[in-house]
Amino acid sequence: MVPFQSLLKKGVTFTWGDLQQKGFEKVKDILTAPATMTPPIKGQPMMLYLTSTNESVGGLLVQEVEGVEKLVYYISRCLHGSELNYSPMEKHCLSLVEVTRKLCHYLLAHKLIVVTRSDPIKYLLSKTVMAGRASRWYFMLGEFDISVMQPKAVKSQALSDLLAYFPSKSLHEEILSDDLPGEVHVEVCHIEPSCGEWQLFFDGSSTTSGGGAGIVLIPPEARCEHEEALSLAFKLDFPCTNNQPEYETLVLGLHTATIIGVEELCIIGDSNLVVKQTNGEFSLKEPMLAPYRDLVRSFLDKFQSVRCEHSRRSFNRYADALATLASKINMPNGE
């Protein structure tokens, strides 16, 4: 647009020269060129680049074809209201949630590789009590096959085009770097999978207004109980039956174990009904629990070895305490 700016000034004689003609031809070529976005290729994983600033979030979805990243789709939007007060990492998580929400028809059919140095999934797992928006985000992301890859350099032209929509507010603070512009970098929970059998303690709690879920994942090298454990609590903000929170908790625990990369797992719970139904020893008499049982079985197939054991409540006090704590949390409107 630079060649035309001089013609738009007040009091300037309109003169169309070679410079303006070249600019016009360039704009015409851009408007008449074929769309840069390409349809996704079935069976090939998709790569997602995330970006977030103080006022906006966005993401770019690409597929690698013969060594070249082809643009599939990109979205961006401005932040509004309380979203402007989110921490930098929460905004980064929000960008992932927005992409999965709007492009779920693409992502449900493909494996998704998030190219980022700040892992949103591990950030959510680092929260001891997962309530409010963090809990909702974790549930929403649970239906997608998501993995994370560390970026090495910006090679995608499509990525460069996307990041142009998110200019930095402080140009003097920028330095030449191969890192992804627009990213936030914070310390997050980093868990390396260990060889051997992990233990998963789970317990659910139900109240008249909702419920709570508590899980404890203990690696095989832990010397004493819960010293090196991963402990998570979730608020179930919907009416629950007696057995529904137990199944919700078991699904959350299995999903967390798969994210960490656990291969051998021992599941321990104090709900004899859920344990027996998981092992196939009891039949399912409540139709509303059938989807939970099927989801649990699909998760069990992802482990090399898995067994489910019943324990007394006294041996499951830590998970029980987390579930009770989460069930007592009152979530304000909008959280």
Image (tube, grey):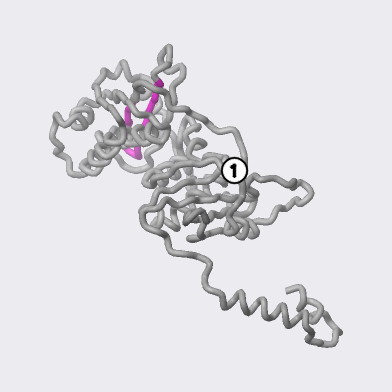
Picture coordinates of residue 33 (x, y %)? Answer: 56, 75
The residue positioned 14% from the left and 31% from the top of the image is 282
In the image, residue 222 above or below residue 283: above
Question: Can residue 212 be seen in this snapshot?
Answer: no
The residue positioned 72% from the left and 79% from the top of the image is 22
Q: Magenta segment range?
A: 202-219
Q: Residue furthest right?
A: 11
Question: Can residue 253 be seen in this snapshot?
Answer: yes
Picture coordinates of residue 209 (x, y %)? Answer: 35, 39
Picture coordinates of residue 331 (x, y %)? Answer: 46, 41
Q: Residue furthest front?
A: 66
Q: Nearer the viewer, residue 253 or 197?
A: 197
Picture coordinates of residue 256 (x, y %)? Answer: 39, 34
Where disc 1 sits, the SS reads loop
Query: How many numbered marks have been drawn onto this rendered protein structure?
Result: 1
Q: Nearer the viewer, residue 187 or 109?
A: 109
The residue positioned 49% from the left and 46% from the top of the image is 114
SS majority, magenta: strand
* Residue 280, quarter of picture: top left
Q: Nearer the viewer, residue 70 or 309?
A: 70
Magenta residue check for 203:
yes
The residue positioned 25% from the left and 34% from the top of the image is 243
* Residue 39, quarter of picture: bottom left
Q: Which residue is mark 1?
A: 152
Q: Amino acid at mark 1?
A: Lys
Left or right placement of residue 285 versus residue 229 in this view: left
